Image (cartoon, grey):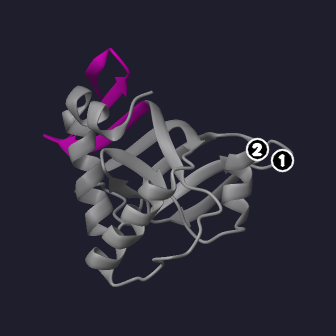
Amino acid sequence: MTFWTEFTEEAPKISTVFRRRHQAAGNLCMLGTLRADGSPRISPIEPRIFEGMLVLAGMPGTTKFKDLGRDPRFCLHTATVDTMVGDGDAKLFGTVTDLRDREVHVRFAQDLFEESGFDIRGQEFDHFYVADLTGASCVEVADDQLAITIWKPGEGERVVRK
């Protein structure tokens, strides 16, 4: 399993672009999942990096989490409003595992409260999805060229210029 900490070591460029865009958009990303009929679904989500893991958690009973419960594959895309991608753009690919560790949930809720004031302390999680990253990419424009950095576990980053 490639947790966030391993990803940042193997893909420093992509993880930096992801963190920058994630923070600039107020943690907002777009999550791609697969519906029951196999068609794609795009949903907003505010993923969090917590204790070395990329966590996809949120409001219980939503269709995006039903999708992940049925098929754990996902694509996570940083929210982009600049068509020239001047600040970069990143995508993460992988699968999720539902981490059923109550102690982790309690620490997560406390951390969320301390950082944002949003209080879900004491509530039970229907799901607590942790990402296993299987690939990632980022796009940046430099010297009038599009630089696409691509990563797969164990292969490091490589750059394609267009």
Q: Residue at x 21, y 46 (%)?
A: 16
Which marked residue is nearer to the observer: mark 2 or mark 1?
2
In this picture, residue 98 sits left or right of residue 133: right
**79 to 77, vertically: above or below:** below
Q: State which quarter of the image contains the N terminus.
A: top left
Q: Mark number for residue 120?
A: none
**65 to 133, vertically: above or below:** below
User: Could you tell me residue 54's position as x and y percent?
Assistant: 40, 48
In this picture, residue 127 sits left or right of residue 47: right
User: Could you tell me residue 120's position as x and y percent?
Assistant: 48, 78
Dot placed on the residue nearer the N-terminal end, 2 or 1: 1
**64 to 158, vertically: above or below:** below
Q: Farthest residue in the right direction? A: 37
Q: Residue at x 30, y 54 (%)?
A: 85
Marks 2 & 1, CB-CB < 8 Å contact: yes
Decide: few, some or many residues near mark 2? Use Cα within 10 Å; few <14, some 14-19, many ≥20: few
Disc 2 marks a residue whose amino acid type is Arg
Query: In the rendered image, which residue does mark 1 sit on?
Result: 36
| Mark 2 → mark 1, Cα distance in angstroms | 8 Å
The reply to whether residue 114 is in sight is yes
Element assignment for label 1: loop
Q: Is residue 66 magenta?
A: no
In this picture, residue 31 sits left or right of residue 26: right
In this picture, residue 27 sits left or right of residue 93: left
Disc 1 marks a residue whose amino acid type is Ala
Q: Which residues are magenta?
A: 135-162
Q: Is residue 143 magenta?
A: yes
Element assignment for label 2: helix
Q: Mark number for residue 70?
A: 2
Q: Farthest residue in the front direction? A: 103
User: Could you tell me residue 3's position as x and y percent?
Assistant: 37, 36
User: Could you tell me residue 156's position as x and y percent?
Assistant: 27, 19
